[in-house]
Image (cartoon, helix red, strand yellow):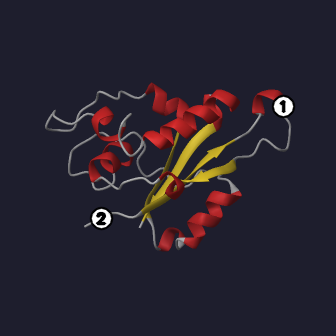
Amino acid sequence: MSTDFDGMIECRPWVRNRADDDEDLQWHASIELWHLNLGNAHDALACLFGVRNHFGFRPLAEDRGLPADVSDGARKSFGECGGPEYTFGTTWIGWSELTAADWDGTDDSGTLTRRAVAGPGTHWAPVWDVMRTLAGLHGAEHVRLVVWFR
């Protein structure tokens, strides 16, 4: 059984060039995940988000819900998927968390690593490329991934 999911990479652009009290420090939708042609390999979803985690990974970001300050674009896309009534496992993770994660952490069997199932060279590489580029422009703490499952 496959697991459908949607999501959005968000960023707070050019925050480093603004005053802390600037009203425009909000998150903006950058790109929807479907544009990046992701596979839905269960091992990757398990290690990243705890969804279909029959592998025993300790997920990086599980069931955090939508961020309180989610972008209008992500909120709209989430609503178009049916919102909380028709989705599950809604969560988010920032680029700074992803870069600090233990990518060599394994599943319960000790055979699969995060790097092997969701790192460079996997279907997730385009997501990490986009997030890395945005973080280089706007700062790691101003880039995040928001996902939900159906």
Q: What secondary structure is found at the residue carrying circle 2? A: loop
Packing grade of label 2 (10 A; few <14, some 14-19, many >=20) is few
Q: Nearer the viewer, residue 49 or 63?
A: 49
Packing grade of label 1 (10 A; few <14, some 14-19, many >=20) is few
Q: Nearer the viewer, residue 114 or 49?
A: 114
Q: Nearer the viewer, residue 24 or 37?
A: 37
Q: Which residue is depicted at the point 43% across and 52% down?
A: 63
What's the amino acid at mark 2?
A: Ser
Residue 124, horizontal then vertical, whole percent: 41, 43
What's the amino acid at mark 1?
A: Arg
Q: Which residue is depicted at the point 82% across and 28% down?
A: 17
- Quadrant assignment for the N terminus: bottom left
Kindly identify which residue carries mark 2: 2
Compared with 149, 145 (above or below) is above
Answer with the quarter of the image where residue 61 lies: top left
Kindly identify which residue carries mark 1: 18
Residue 111, horizontal then vertical, whole percent: 16, 34
**Left or right: residue 78 compared with residue 108:** right
**Left or right: residue 85 compared with residue 70:** left
Q: What secondary structure is found at the residue carrying circle 1? A: loop
Q: Which residue is depicted at the point 41% across and 67% down?
A: 150
Q: Which residue is depicted at the point 28% across and 35% down?
A: 116
Residue 41, horizontal then vertical, whole percent: 30, 52
